[in-house]
């Protein structure tokens, strides 16, 4: 028998005895029990989310300005570092058509994956 069941049984007994004050007190006890059960459920959910986040953080690696989720030691799609670092949201980046970079659909952060292009010869602004 749980705590709430015990309180209900005590309430029924108080009704038989005819004690209004005891009934009021037991109603308050039942309300507190329900509040504590809700708080307990909320805390369990929060713990589960934190455990899931901890597991997720073990499966991502930062490389080339993005996070990559590793599965079977292979990199998958790139994810936004800004969204994950600030909001703990794993948002997949959308590739540019050139595949040299991507953009976050949530925060609009641009990410370039290609190495910067280097000119073969120095550029001289004053040459004819």
Image (cartoon, grey):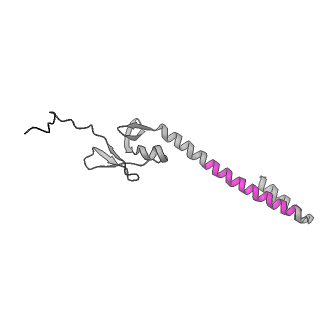
Q: Percent position (x, y) of residue 18?
A: 91, 66
Left or right of 43 in this view: 2: right
Q: Percent position (x, y) of residue 12?
A: 85, 63
Q: Nearer the viewer, residue 125 or 20?
A: 125
Instruction: Name the residue at 48% across, 37% down.
Output: 58
Q: Nearer the viewer, residue 108 or 88?
A: 108
- Seen as rendered, the residue at the extreme top is 121
Q: Give the magenta part as a residue range.
A: 22-45
Instruction: Name the residue at 42% across, 45% down.
Output: 82
Choose top left, top right, bottom left or bottom right for residue 81. top left
Left or right of 1 in this view: 113: left
Q: Overall secondary structure of the magenta stretch? A: helix
Left or right of 2 in this view: 80: left
Q: Is residue 62 magenta?
A: no
The quadrant of the image that shows the C terminus is top left
Instruction: Name the residue at 42% across, 38% down.
Output: 70
Q: Percent position (x, y) of residue 113?
A: 31, 40
């Amino acid at each position: 028998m749980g705590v709430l069941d015990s309180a209900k049984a005590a309430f029924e007994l108080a009704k038989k005895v005819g004690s209004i004050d005891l009934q009021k007190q037991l109603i308050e006890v039942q309300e507190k029990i329900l509040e504590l059960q809700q708080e307990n459920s909320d805390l369990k959910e929060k713990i589960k989310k934190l455990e899931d986040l901890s597991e997720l953080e073990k499966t991502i690696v930062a490389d080339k300005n993005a996070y990559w989720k590793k599965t079977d030691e292979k990199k998958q799609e790139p994810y936004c570092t800004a969204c994950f670092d600030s909001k703990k949201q794993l948002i997949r980046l959308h590739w540019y058509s050139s595949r040299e970079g991507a953009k976050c659909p949530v925060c609009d952060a641009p990410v370039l994956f290609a190495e910067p292009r280097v000119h073969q010869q120095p550029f001289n602004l004053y040459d004819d």
